[in-house]
Image (cartoon, helix red, strand yellow):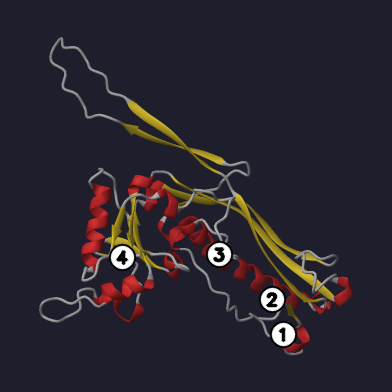
């Protein structure tokens, strides 16, 4: 893929409206959980629980101790960015043409940010490098979740899901959603009844029905990214996971310098280029790790 986009070689003289945006990316976590604005300096959420059951009190009887546990979870936004060089002919193009560029770029950035949310929150990695991020630290599912079902040879994926749900519900917690890797969704789609018909026909041909047996479901390759053994993640996405953004900076057009620190491409002005950059402060938090369970492939 080229490092510099040149309008003269990539586009016709008259730029057609509505550029076809081939950028891919989506977030299963964002689809299953609630987004809320996050202050620039972070957000502290408190998880609250009453530790015991209600108590019967006899007439004139003494009341016993109940108790409550309040635990804080801090969500601190981190900065993500994306930039690209284009020919400085962009600066002299018509306003309509410039808007087409900026719209396509900002939409592409939104898709990359959505995919990045999954990769960062699932695996704790920098999406660009694929390497564990010290900025994220332990604030990701792979590190936080201890409820794990390991897929064994001959296992039914249906049984794996039931076992994972049981790990959560045995702790009297709710399950609101299931995220699957494509290979796990495919295994589930192949299951058949005793009569030979498909057990889950709504999953046939790669379809994503949105719900399965009344449970919200999403399929994403982000869960099994790289060498990850993650194949399924069930849990209370509606109440035990939070995400949001603190500030979304509009696309910036940079005309001078070397904003991407590329020693080969060098100075923008010296190469008749400008730089488009978008940034966002994005944060998330796993409020209760016990409310989630992984289904993982064997090592």
Q: On the image, numbered disc 1 is attached to which residue?
A: 15
Q: On the image, numbered disc 3 is attached to which residue?
A: 130
Q: Is residue 11 visible?
A: no
For the residues bearing labels 2 and 1, Cβ distance under 8 angstroms: yes
* Separation (CA) of disc 3 from disc 2: 31 Å
Q: Where residue 236 sits: x, y (%)?
A: 35, 51
The residue lying at 66 percent from left, 82 percent from top is 17
For the residues bearing labels 4 and 2, Cβ distance under 8 angstroms: no
Q: Secondary structure at mark 1?
A: loop
Vertical placement of residue 188 versus 134, above or below: below
* Separation (CA) of disc 1 from disc 3: 35 Å
Pointer 3 or 2: first along the chain? 2
Pointer 1 or 3: first along the chain? 1
Q: Where residue 275 sits: x, y (%)?
A: 77, 69
Pointer 2 or 1: first along the chain? 1
Q: On the image, numbered disc 4 is attached to which residue?
A: 211
Q: On the image, numbered disc 2 is attached to which residue?
A: 100
The residue lying at 70 percent from left, 81 percent from top is 2
Question: Which image quadrant is residue 49 in?
Answer: top left
* Separation (CA) of disc 2 from disc 1: 8 Å
* Separation (CA) of disc 4 from disc 2: 36 Å
Label 4 Cα crowd, 10 Å radius (few <14 / some 14-19 / many 20+): few
Q: Where residue 181 sits: x, y (%)?
A: 38, 69
Label 3 Cα crowd, 10 Å radius (few <14 / some 14-19 / many 20+): some
């Amino acid at each position: 893929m080229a490092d510099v986009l040149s309008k003269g070689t990539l586009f016709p003289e008259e730029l057609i409206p509505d550029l076809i945006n081939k950028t891919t990316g989506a977030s299963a976590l964002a689809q299953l959980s609630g987004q809320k604005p996050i202050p620039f300096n972070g957000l502290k959420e408190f998880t609250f629980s009453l530790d015991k059951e209600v108590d019967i009190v006899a007439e004139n009887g003494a009341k016993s101790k109940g108790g409550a546990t309040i635990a804080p979870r801090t969500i601190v936004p981190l900065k993500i960015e994306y930039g690209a060089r284009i020919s400085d002919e962009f600066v002299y193009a018509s306003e309509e043409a410039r808007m087409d560029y900026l719209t396509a770029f900002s939409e592409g950035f939104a898709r990359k940010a959505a995919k990045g949310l999954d990769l960062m929150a699932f695996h704790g990695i920098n999406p660009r490098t694929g390497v564990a991020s010290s900025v994220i630290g332990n604030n990701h599912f792979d590190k936080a979740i201890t409820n794990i079902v390991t897929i064994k040879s001959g296992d039914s994926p249906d049984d794996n899901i039931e076992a994972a749900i049981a790990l959560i519900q045995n702790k009297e917690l709710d399950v609101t959603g299931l995220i699957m890797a494509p290979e796990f969704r495919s295994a589930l789609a192949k299951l058949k009844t005793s009569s030979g018909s498909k057990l889950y026909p709504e999953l046939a041909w790669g379809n994503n029905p949105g719900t399965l047996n009344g449970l919200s479901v999403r399929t994403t390759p982000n869960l099994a990214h790289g060498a990850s053994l993650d194949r399924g993640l069930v849990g209370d996405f509606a109440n035990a996971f939070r995400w949001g953004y603190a500030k979304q900076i509009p696309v910036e057009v940079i005309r001078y310098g070397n904003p991407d620190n590329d020693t080969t491409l060098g100075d923008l002005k010296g190469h008749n280029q400008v730089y488009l950059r978008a940034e966002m402060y994005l944060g998330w938090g796993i409020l209760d790790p016990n409310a989630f369970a992984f289904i993982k492939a064997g090592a």
